[in-house]
Amino acid sequence: MKSKNVILIFDKKIMYKPLIFRLAKDFDIVFNVLEAKILPKLEGRIILELRGTEESIATSIDYLTSEGVVVEPLSDKIVRDDERCINCGACTSVCRVDALCIDRQTMEVRFDPDKCVACGLCKIACPVGAMSGKSIDLD
Amino acid sequence: MSGVEIKKSYEEINKKIREGKAVVVTAEEMPEIVASEGVDGAFKKVDVVTTGTFGAMCSSGAFINIGHTRPRMKATKVWFNNVEAYGGLAAVDCYIGATQVQENDPLNMVHPGKFNYGGGHVIEDLIARKRIGLKAVGYGTDCYPLKEHDAKITIDDLRDAIMFNPRNAYQNYNCAVNLSQKTIYTYLGILKPDMANASYSSAGQLSPLLNDPYYWTIGTGTRIFLCGAAGSVVWHGTQHAPDCKRGPNGIPCEGAGTLAVMGNMKEMDPRFVRGASFTGYGCSIMIGIGVPIPIINKDMAYFTGQTDRDLRCQVVDYGNDYPSGISRSLGEVTYAELKSGKIEFMGKTIDAAPMSSYPMARKIALELKEWVKKGFTIGIPQTPFPTVPHGKDDETR
């Protein structure tokens, strides 16, 4: 079994179409909704964990893409500008998955993109605009 | 300051600095020396302790002289990148404040607002030598006929750019929690309901005024590190309040003292300044300040030898109390507890996160240590700050 976190972006034409249940029914994918937001008449965004064989994950992503869903892997969505970051730690208070946490020896903020679920709260919490990238909220 | 015992004079310390013989350590290194050699030993050994802090300091800004135009102009309103600067000064002088937001910013109309760009960002962009927009308008006079001026400028095109911050480097600060039932957006960050997190903003043991709790060595004329340049303390800051609650070690456990500081923006380093946007609150600026503390007597060795375990602050409710103007402390915590990332408070374990940068504070204290070792002498305070006597009744206030 493999696992992959993806962000799905549904534009307004397809946002009310029932697509997610097909992942389980047709592709044998175990999905876990990590976060979802519908912005009426604009678009919908879902952060989904996909679990299954490598092949079933790949074909399910192909299916979603064929239906017009924009599918992007999560691990490279949120990025930190290390030059801009001043290691204050404000982001660590809102990060729910400990992708951002403080090294207690140095008090520096560590960012682990693999743990990130792109909720985007760090972008709201960071006072110096060091965090950017696609998240569940519109930019 | 007249009552302060000077056992090692400024002249003696400065002579050593000029000769490259001064012993200089940071406020992070001092506690170890005091622990191993005692207060007496540390006083004899160490000449200067360097401090540092890096955090949001809203009461900051800059006096800017844009230089005379041809024809001449009396600029009554001035904007930099569409952020208004106060123009009610002489012809081409103005003051840009850190919290001024860009024109037409939606503010909190859709709460919480983003406050993407303001005066603090203008100051950062100027220091980073970026090209920015300048617009000025005037009503026209016989001697200053020009009514409108538009230009793209960098800091090098300005006649003067002098940072002047009326209140910086608060001696101590609240630890904020939220007892209300909704998430709030404050200058101390995002606070979740029911006291789910705590936020604080102080460099603790590295913080300048916590190392000189009675302002014996800091006054008008003290030379400091200000955003990477050599600046000055010019007065005590606004809201300076020496008569505060102090611990048994004499060190304030709440707000207390503040500094008014100045420095030449043209000499500053963009690594030590940041325009800041606090979601739902507004624009601000993060400033890096370091103050060298001369160890003029044993008490100063004792104070600079205190650690985060000895330094306390008040936990305050920003959900109801603070906005209502109710001065109530929910209790005290130490900076050592806060820096561990979790505090035990009112029967709960609460995540604590900083809003000021300890790594930057450390970097500033280390940089200032190198400056002093290379001949940056101590500015002898000319006008002392208002203070209180250091005595036995410290904890009873």
Image (cartoon, rainbow, N blue to C red):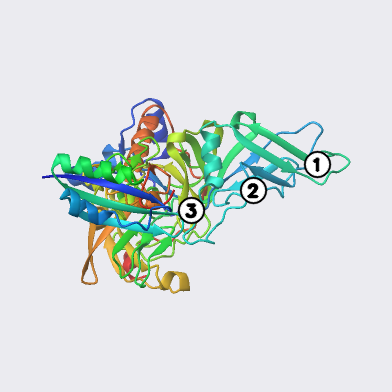
Disc 1 is placed on an element classified as loop
Q: Check disc 2: other Cα within 10 Å, few if <14, some if 14-19, many if 20+.
A: many
Tell me the kind of residue under disc 3: Lys
User: Which residue sits at x=38%, y=73%?
Assistant: B328
Corner quadrant of residue B257: bottom left
Q: Amino acid at mark 1?
A: Lys
Badge 2 marks a residue whose secondary structure is strand
> Would you identify the image quadrant in which residue A74 lies?
top left
Task: Kindly identify which numbered label has been placed on residue B147.
Answer: 1
Badge 1 and badge 2 in a common chain = yes
State whether residue B365 appears in this view. Answer: yes
Is residue B322 shown above or below B304? below
Residue B115 vs B141, above or below: the answer is below
Dot label at residue B84: 2
Q: Tell me where residue B388 appears, x and y as whole percent.
A: 43, 61
- State if disc 2 and disc 3 touch (CB < 8 Å): no
What residue does disc 3 label? B114
B53 sits left or right of B248 in the view: right
Q: Quick check: A26 left or right of B222?
A: left
Quick one: label 1, few (<14), some, or many (20+) residues within 10 Å?
Answer: some
Q: Are marks 3 and 2 on the same chain?
A: yes
